[in-house]
Amino acid sequence: MTTTTSSEPSTALYSEDLAPVPLPARKWNTWNYAALWISMSLCIPTYMLASSLIGGGMNWWQAILTIFLGNTIVLIPMILNGRAGAKYGIPFPVFARASFGVRGANIPAMLRAIVACGWFGIQTWIGGFAIYQAARLWIPSLATLPPIFPSGWGLQTGPAICFILFWTLNMYVVWLGVDSIRRLLVFKAFFLPIAALALLFWAITAVHGGLGPILTQPARLQGPAFWTFFVPALTGMVGFWATLSLNIPDFTRYAVSQRAQIKGQAIGLPPSMTLFAFIGVVVTSATTLLYGEPIWDPVVLAGKFESRLLVTLAMIAVAISTLATNIAANIVSPANDFANLYPQKINFRTGGFITGVLGILIFPWKLIADPGGYIFTWLVGYSSLLGPIGGILIADYYLIRRQQLNVADLYSLHGAYAYTSGFNRRAIGCLLLGIVPNVPGFLATIGVISPGALPAWIISLYSYAWFVGFFISGLGYWLSFNDKKQVTYVSVDY
C-alpha cells in the first residue's frame, strides 16, 4: 500500500463551502435523512412521473411496481456514494477529485450541474404554469394573447409571461440567500401531503364506485409492447434520482454516522416515492374515466375545476411549494458544482444565477410536454451521462482505493490526485466509453437519425442507458488498473 504525505491546500481548490465538515458539525441523524427524502419525493414531478406511466399505457400496479423497482435500484449507488461523504465530510465535487483528478472533477461536476439546471427549468415551468392557470381565470385575455415566439418553440405568450415572472421570483430568492426559504420549506412540508390526500379523496369520490373502477382498468400495453415501454421506463425511474445518487455526499457529509445516512435513505426514499406515486396513479386513472383521457399534469387537472377561488388558491400554493423545492433541491447542489470551477470567485448567488439562465435555455416546457419526451428524452437521456460517472466513482472508491482517501491531497494541485495536470485520463476515457454506446439510441429518439440506420440492438441499448453506462464505465475503469493495491491511499484527516 502506497502512502502519501499531506499537502498544503491550494486556493484554486479550497473554499469554506468545499472544505470537509468537522465532526462536531455533523448533526444529521436517521430521521433527518428520512425527512429529507420524504420532502424531496413529495413534489409535482414525482406525481407526474407516476402519471406519465399511466399515460404511456401501464395499469396501476405495473406503474407502482416500476417506480418501486427503480427507486430501490438507485438507492444502492445512493448509499454507496453517500458513505464517502459521511466518512470524510466532503461534498460531491471534492469526492470526484479522487477518481477524475483535482481538475478533471469539473467534468462530472458540470455534467451533473447541467442536469440540475434542467430540473430547475422544469420546476420553474411548473410553478409559472400554475400561476398562469390561476391568472387566466381572472384575466381571460391572457389565454388569447398573440404569439410572439417562433412556432418551433412550442411556447404560448400567456404561459411564457407567467414563466418569466416566476423565474424572476426564483432569482430574487437566490439573491436573498438560502436562509430566506426556510419558512417556504415548512409550508411545503405541510401543504403537499394535504393537497395530495385531497386529490386522492377527490378521485375516489368523483368516480362512481370509488377505487374499484380505477384499479380495475386494464393495461393498454400487452406482450412485447409492454416490455418495449417497461425497460426505458425503469431506466427513467432510476434516472429520476440519478443526479442525487452522485451528489448525495453534499448531504451525507453532515451525517452523525454511516448508520444514520443508510437507514434514513432506505426509510425515506422508496416508500415515500411509491406512496406519492400511487396517489398520482389513482388520480390519473380517475381522469381517464372522467374526461376520456389521462391528465398526468396536476396543474392542468386543477385548471378544470369550476371554482375560480379554489383553483387560484391551489395554484398559488403549488407555486409557493414549487419555489421552495426548486431552490432547495436544484440550486444548492449545482452551486457547489459551479463553485468547484473557481472556488474563490463563484459563490452560492453566482452559481444560482448561472443555474437560472441555463434552466431557461434548456426549453423545459418541451421536456414535459408529453410522457415520451419526459421519460425517453429527458430522464433516460441524462441517465446515459450520469450512469457512467456513478460507475467510475464506485469502482474507484470501493474496488481501487478500498474506501481510503487522503483528504488533504483532495485540495492540493501536487498531491496524489493531481494525475496528469490535474486530470485522470483513465476516468475520462472510461466516461466516454460508457456514454458512446447510448448515443445512437438517443439520436434516434430525438429524430436526428432513422431508427433503421443502425442495427436494432445498437439502438435498443439506449433503453438501458443508465445500466449500460454504469457497468461499462465502472468495469472498464477497474480493469484499467493492473495493480489495484498500488493506488490505495491511507486515510489522512484534514
Image: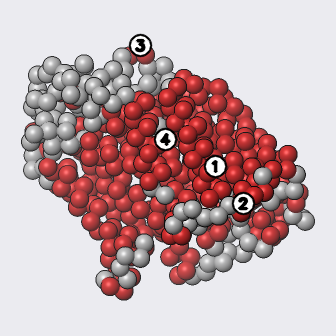
Marks 1 and 3 in Cβ contact (< 8 Å): no
Say which mark, if any, is on residue 488: none
Marks 1 and 2 in Cβ contact (< 8 Å): no
Which SS class for mark 3? helix
Q: Earlier in the sequence, mark 2 or mark 4?
A: 2
Q: Earlier in the sequence, mark 2 or mark 3?
A: 3
Frontmost residue, 164 versus 190: 164
Measured in 3D between alpha carbons, the distance from the residue under mark 3 to the one under mark 4, in whole angstroms, is 27 Å
Answer above or below: position of 144 versus 15. below
Q: How many marks?
A: 4
Q: Amino acid at mark 1?
A: Cys
Which SS class for mark 2? helix
Measured in 3D between alpha carbons, the distance from the residue under mark 1 to the one under mark 3, in whole angstroms, is 45 Å
* Residue ID for mark 2: 143
Q: Amino acid at mark 2?
A: Ala
The N terminus - image quarter? top left
| Nearest-to-viewer mark from 4 and 1 | 1
Q: Earlier in the sequence, mark 1 or mark 2?
A: 2
Residue 299 position, x and y percent, is 70, 54
Measured in 3D between alpha carbons, the distance from the residue under mark 1 to the one under mark 2, in whole angstroms, is 11 Å
Q: Amino acid at mark 4?
A: Asn
Q: Amino acid at mark 3?
A: Pro
* Residue ID for mark 1: 162
* Residue ID for mark 3: 24
Q: Residues within 10 Å of mark 1 (few under 14, many from 20)?
A: many
Which SS class for mark 4? helix
Which of the 4 quarters of the picture holds residue 61?
Answer: bottom right
* Residue ID for mark 4: 330
For image coordinates 60% across by 43% down, the residue present is 166
